[in-house]
Amino acid sequence: MPTRRRATSIPFPFAAIVAQDEPKLAVLLAAINPRIGGVLLSGPKGIGKTSIVRGVGDLLPIVLRARCPYGCDPAGSALCDECATGVNARARARRVRSGIVELPASAQIDDVVGTVDVRAALESGKIAFRPGLLAAANRSILYIDEINLLGDVIVDVLLDAAAQGVVRVKRGQQVIEYPSRFALIGTMNPEEGELRPQITDRIGLRVFIGPATVPAERAEIYRRNAAFARDPQAFANEYLARTRALRARVVRAIALLPAVAPEPRAVDFAIDAITKLGIDSHRTEFVALEAACALAAFEGRRSAGADDVRRVLPMAARLRGNRLRVQALTEYHAENATIDAALEAAEHDEPEPSAAVPDEPARGRMIVSPALTERPAARARPQTQREGQPIAVRPLAGGRLDITATILDAGVAARSGVPAEPKESVDAAVPLRLTLFIVDASQSTMKSASAVVAAAHELLRPVYTERERAALISCWGPAAEVVVDEHAGRNVELVSMRLTELDPGETRALTPLPDALERARRIAERFRRANPSAGVEIAIFSDGRANVPLGGEAELTRVLADGGDARMLAATAAEQCRTLAARLAGRATTTFVNLDDLESSPLMRELAGLARGRYFAMSDIVARIG
Ligand SMILES: [Zn+2]
């Protein structure tokens, strides 16, 4: 099955996907009942994980969405502030098909939860909020490809939102809250890295997806993929009737779900089986019973029985509990056998096997894909090295500084005359990071102090933690100066404050860029030695008119005394910058911001290339922010 998005937006029809019964059932149930808490599809590349997800997106119902950023249900209770307080949300609603919102692998935390609109903030002096991807995902499926490669901070935020149906963003003293109810579907290739067990544990259904092993199935998969590749539209048309029928079933199931309840016997059965598996978390039976209800609704029934539980419990119980987790990581199907055995045992425990619940173990097995049960043990992934490693812990206490909010407020405060205060941020465990600013205020650059502050904001995301240091190097006069170093207490606040206070004074003609780069490199190396896993980012704001070589005043005097001139000094300084920039490559993430909008000097762009960093003209930054 295709795994890449094709030029056309036509998804591979869900009804045309061969085998993969358990993954297909899992995503259908999640689409019907978001309370299941999402699905994790785990398997190698190129076997159609993405097709299953995009295919189910095509089966979602048409819903009424308010024209607010969150697409609220005007008849629902979970309304955003705009819909709750504004005039008649229903009048401003429109009918659209729920769909899939895909989270790009490159997404940053601000893209996900939303961010402060810097330009609006700088212009008005008020914090304006721009909602993130989780707003768009409200009442849709949120699809995260390669969820195991996403940063822990982002995954935590996503799972919090998935569990609560609400996103809470704290920026400074502002707390913004908006509805975000979505079915999360994550896919991953375990060969590319494991998902933290705590994260796996928070996803409702876990499904392994393997290649088809029956030759006839593989041949059919090939035939359908080839037909789809030749003419996606014709292929989709071929399946149109089946797609429509399936969509109608999903729509009916969503409508029926509120009326579906589990039978008492089904509840007992689920708890009995889960207890036998030694799983402590109550969440497992909650997920299993919600999934059982979704399955009953899908089949047009108003009550979920023990048989429904039997069919969904492997997906809900898999990878729960320490003993099972270790076992599963080494040998997937051994765990399935354990689950099956517990289910068998629980079935025998049933006091009065009712005629309404036929004893039909074969049916229970049908939803397990053959690939899964027949997977040879030798092909299972080897023991992960994660076992025994310390696991990141979310800090409990508050008081984390939000450098973004702090710097932004400093910029706003500078305009409004109100003193900036340090800002707290949400909790998160992320690696230590140093952000180092080099600011060249030698030219006309300080005319746009607020633009530098705005750009700094743009470069300083995501910042959500106390494990954050900043440093500031000023770049004018005969030598650069470390205004705030990485050791200074509360140095993030200091940097934000000093950024707005930079005053080149009398020496604005001199730009000691080589010295600034050299000082930055030394600080970066010192920091990395002390914190080997830390990240270092260096942001250089300059117009690239370097004219003071290394050695400062003494060197200036020497060159001029030897009959050198300004042109020679500039050439030497530029050459030194090139050498130093190349030395930064691979050692730090660099961003070169050319403060000269006309980009009349090519040096900044050249340095970015040598440092393998990013390059922006100031106008790019303003465009990005706007
Ligand atoms: Zn709304």
Image: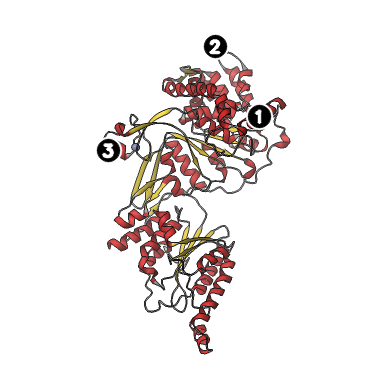
Tag 2 residue: 354
Residue 307 got which mark? none
Q: Earlier in the sequence, mark 1 or mark 3?
A: 3
Callout 3: 10 Å neighbours few (<14), some, many (20+)? few
Q: Is residue 402 visible?
A: no
Question: Do the residues bearing badges 2 and 1 touch, measured as CB atoms within 8 Å?
Answer: no
On the image, the x and y values in percent for residue 599 come to: 46, 66
Which callout, 2 or 1, points at the residue further toward the start of the chain?
Answer: 1
State whether residue 397 is above or below residue 519. above
Q: Is residue 61 above or below residue 412?
A: above
Quadrant of the image containing the N terminus: top right
Label 3 residue SS: helix
Instruction: Give the class, few, some or many, for how many residues have Cα within 10 Å of label 1's Cα (few <14, many ≥20).
Output: some
**Left or right, residue 395 beside residue 328:** left
Vertical order, 283 against 387 (above or below)? above
What's under tag 2, amino acid-wise? Ser
Residue at image position (70%, 31%) is 375
Ligand 1 is within 8 Å of the C-beta of the residue at disc 1: no
Residue 221: mark in rendering: 1
Mark 3 sits on what residue? 85
Amino acid marked by disc 1: Ile
Left or right of 263 on screen, residue 340: right
Label 1, label 3: how far apart the Cα atoms are? 52 Å
Q: Secondary structure at mark 2?
A: loop
Mark 1 near mark 3, Cβ–Cβ under 8 Å? no
